[in-house]
Image (cartoon, helix red, strand yellow):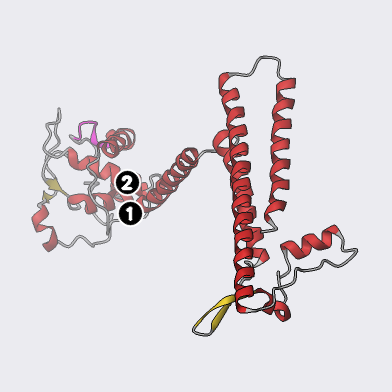
């Protein structure tokens, strides 16, 4: 394969540039190189030397195969009395760049000369062309080899770019941020028709903080009730359960002095505080307020009409 000899030139240049860069860095550095740096330099040298040896071995094997194949063709031609193909005569005065262009891009053998590379063996009357691979394909393959060597030296041994582990951790961190944004969007899409009770300790802790800052003034910290009704008994004015409590918090009870908290709390926060209010039921407050409303039972909630206009009558419970 004639194009293989041209591959040695870029690799030699690469090796020279790498060695020059290491020598320049060593000349500028004041302190002696560390063991890690020496190990990296040795790795560069070994990789480049190994690549050159591998390419030299490939060229040697290709040349040997070409020689043996040529001898076999000559012997078969003599046995069958066929004329041997004449070697291609290069035009006089052909420039170096013209030869490079023909070598690396143009077809190896024109269609009108395909008879010169026809194999001498036949299978049921079918003969083969001993043509080379398309030059553009060979060039791309050679470029991938050069790229892989440079990539390996730059990333895996030089530590100049992010490793696969670092890229994985970066992508995972980005994915977690995107998941958090998506979950936050889902949380803020909660309303009285699809709200559910939260049992997570973190969410209930945030709900307790919201309750203490926004609700305790009227309902007391222990939920026993003051201006507002008692949250610790089974009696509810606007219905119990997470959906009714969420709706009452969201729209408020303006005629009783309870504002619509939808203007100050997002749906996620209202869900948290409503879930926390449910945890107060059954506790023992210091001074419980008298029961108001009717007893709420979850199993009877389906029979109760909870779609009335919120804030029509009664207090905040």
For marks 2 and 1, the one nearer the N-term is: 1
* Residue 12 horizontal side relative to residue 271, left or right: right
The residue labelled by disc 2 is 270
For the view shown, which residue lies furthest in the right direction? 93
Q: Where residue 66 appears, x then y in whole percent?
A: 63, 60
* Residue 87 horizontal side relative to residue 198, left or right: right
Q: Which residue corresponds to the image point at 60% horizontal and 75% vertical from the top-left? A: 79
Quarter of the figure with residue 30:
top right
Residues at badges 2 and 1 in contact (C-beta under 8 Å)? yes
Quarter of the figure with residue 32:
top right
Q: Could you tell me how far apart the alpha carbons at marks 2 and 1 are, in whole angstroms?
A: 9 Å
Q: Which residues are drawn in magenta?
A: 218-223
For the question of whether residue 230 can be seen, the reply is no
Q: Where residue 13 appears, x then y in whole percent?
A: 73, 41
The residue labelled by disc 1 is 190
Q: Where residue 139 appears, x then y in whole percent?
A: 66, 59
């Amino acid at each position: 394969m004639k194009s293989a000899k041209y591959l040695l030139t870029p690799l030699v240049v690469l090796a020279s540039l790498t060695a020059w860069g290491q020598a320049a860095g060593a000349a500028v550095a004041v302190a002696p190189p560390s063991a890690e740096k020496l190990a990296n330099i040795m790795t560069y040298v070994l990789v480049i030397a190994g690549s050159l040896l591998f390419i030299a071995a490939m060229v040697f094997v290709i040349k040997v195969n070409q020689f043996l194949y040529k001898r076999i063709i000559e012997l078969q031609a003599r046995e069958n009395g066929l004329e041997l193909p004449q070697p291609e005569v290069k035009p006089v005065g052909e420039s170096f760049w013209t030869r490079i262009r023909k070598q690396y891009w143009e077809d190896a053998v024109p269609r009108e000369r395909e008879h010169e590379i026809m194999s001498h063996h036949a299978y049921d009357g079918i003969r083969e062309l001993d043509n080379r691979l398309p030059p553009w394909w060979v060039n791309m393959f050679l470029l991938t080899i050069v790229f892989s060597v440079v990539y390996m030296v730059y990333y895996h041994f030089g530590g100049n770019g992010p490793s696969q582990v670092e890229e994985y951790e970066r992508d995972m961190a980005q994915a977690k941020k995107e998941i958090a944004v998506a979950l936050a969007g889902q949380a803020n899409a909660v309303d009285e028709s699809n709200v559910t009770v939260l049992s997570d300790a973190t969410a209930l802790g945030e709900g307790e903080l919201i309750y203490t800052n926004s609700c305790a003034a009227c309902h007391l910290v222990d939920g026993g009730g003051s201006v507002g009704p008692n949250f610790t008994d089974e009696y509810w004015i606007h219905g119990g359960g997470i959906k009714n409590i969420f709706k009452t918090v969201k729209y408020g009870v303006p005629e009783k002095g309870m504002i619509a908290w939808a203007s100050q709390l997002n749906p996620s926060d209202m869900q948290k505080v409503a879930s926390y209010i449910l945890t107060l039921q059954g506790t023992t407050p210091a001074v419980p307020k008298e029961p108001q409303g009717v007893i709420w039972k979850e199993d009877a909630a389906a029979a109760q009409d909870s779609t009335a206009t919120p804030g029509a009558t009664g207090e905040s419970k």
